[in-house]
Image (cartoon, rainbow, N blue to C red):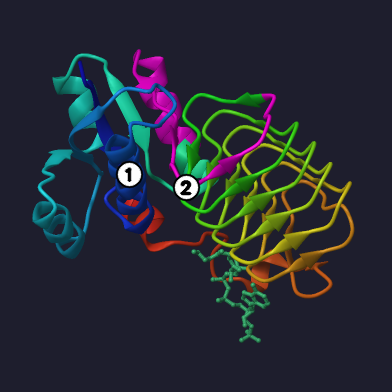
């Protein structure tokens, strides 16, 4: 029996997560070892271009989060939103209404002897997840990211493509690690922090801090246009 689920997020990351689900189905390897049948995509305000991209792949738009909360009995969801704070808000609305988050692991990911993978984790193609690691709820590991031995990523952390989190690192809740960033070993990154794309983090980072550059240094929030990072987040936020 296939497991039915809805995909949340019609943007770039949402459609990458669609690829992960399809790859899992093709190989029959994912968190549940069952075939996932996606009923369609949920997004509060998808662009026409993304709706057409989904239609071309055979997926319909089911409405926004409030629509499925009002119209459907609670079921399973796969969360394809990259921004940690946005994904927490959506996940909590759905889970409070009895919806169940699905964990999906791309068949090409190399997963060592992990301690825990929390509900709703999404592990994309080419990820290297080393030994004795622990992932909280709704942690997203984007393509080709690497998580070193003994590292802990707390709830709602997102690691963007190609980033390297070294061994024995603690990344606290809702932090975003930008594409291609490197976090050196035995550091901690506080809650709600943002590590800019390409940064090399050599010292621990305080909560709610944005760091950029090599070596990474805190940056004044006011020079940044938005502490957010991807088109699909803006779409679902609008
Ligand atoms: C740090 C970050 C959040 C800043 O975003 P922003 O607020 O939109 O910043 P802006 O693009 O307006 O840039 C502001 C200034 O910071 C610089 N800057 C932005 N990101 C930078 C980065 N990662 N490293 C170094 N400098 C950066 C810009 O060059 C610009 O400098 P300038 O005013 O001298 O031209 C963002 O650039 C980032 O790195 N996000 C990570 C997201 C990611 O991984 N994206 C890929 C998704 S797959």
Q: Is residue 142 above or below residue 31?
A: below
Q: Residue at x 43, y 42 (%)?
A: 107
Asked whether the beta carbons under mark 1 and mark 2 sit within 8 Å of each other, the answer is yes
Residue toward you, 58 or 171 = 58
Ligand 1 neighbours mark 2 (CB distance < 8 Å):
no
Residue 218, position in %: x, y? 79, 65
The residue carrying pointer 1 sits among few (fewer than 14), some (14 to 19) or many (20 or more) residues within 10 Å by Cα, namely many
Q: Is residue 177 left or right of residue 119?
A: right
Q: CA distance from mark 1 to mark 2?
A: 9 Å
Identify the image quadrant of residue 94: top left
- Residue 108, disc: 2
From this view, report whether residue 205 is shown above or below residue 61. Answer: below
- Give the structural element (helix, strand or loop) at label 2: loop
The residue drawn where x is 20% and y is 14% is 73
Image coords of residue 85 (percent x, y):
53, 42
Look at the image and say whether residue 168 sits in the magenta stretch. Answer: no
Name the image quarter holding residue 190.
top right
Magenta stretch encompasses residue 103: yes
Q: Is residue 4 left or right of residue 146?
A: left
Residue plotted at (65% across, 52% down): 146
SS assignment at label 1: helix
- Chain part drawn in magenta: 88-115
- Numbered label tally: 2
Return the residue at label 1.
23
Residue located 61% across and 71% down the image? 224
Percent of width and height locating residue 158: 57, 47
């Amino acid at each position: 029996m296939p497991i039915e689920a809805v995909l949340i997020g019609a943007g770039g990351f949402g459609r990458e997560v669609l690829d992960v689900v399809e790859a899992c189905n093709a190989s029959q390897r994912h968190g549940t070892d069952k075939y996932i049948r996606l009923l369609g995509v949920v997004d509060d305000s998808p662009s026409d271009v993304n709706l057409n991209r989904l239609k071309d792949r055979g997926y319909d738009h089911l409405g926004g989060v409030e629509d499925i909360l009002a119209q459907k009995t609670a079921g399973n969801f796969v969360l394809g939103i990259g921004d940690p704070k946005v994904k927490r808000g959506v996940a909590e609305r759905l889970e409070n209404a009895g919806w169940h988050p699905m964990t999906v692991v791309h068949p090409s990911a190399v997963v060592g002897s992990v301690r825990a993978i929390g509900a709703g984790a999404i592990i994309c193609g080419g990820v290297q997840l080393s030994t004795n690691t622990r992932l909280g709820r709704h942690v997203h590991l984007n393509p080709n990211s690497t998580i070193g031995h003994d590292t802990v990523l707390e709830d709602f952390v997102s690691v963007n493509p190609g980033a390297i989190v070294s061994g024995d690192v603690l990344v606290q809740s809702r932090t975003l690690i930008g594409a291609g960033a490197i976090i050196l070993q035995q550091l901690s990154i506080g809650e709600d922090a943002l590590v800019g794309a390409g940064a090399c983090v050599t010292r621990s980072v305080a909560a709610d801090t944005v760091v950029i550059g090599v070596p990474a240094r805190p940056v004044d929030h006011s020079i940044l246009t938005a502490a957010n990072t991807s088109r699909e987040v803006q779409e679902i936020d609008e």
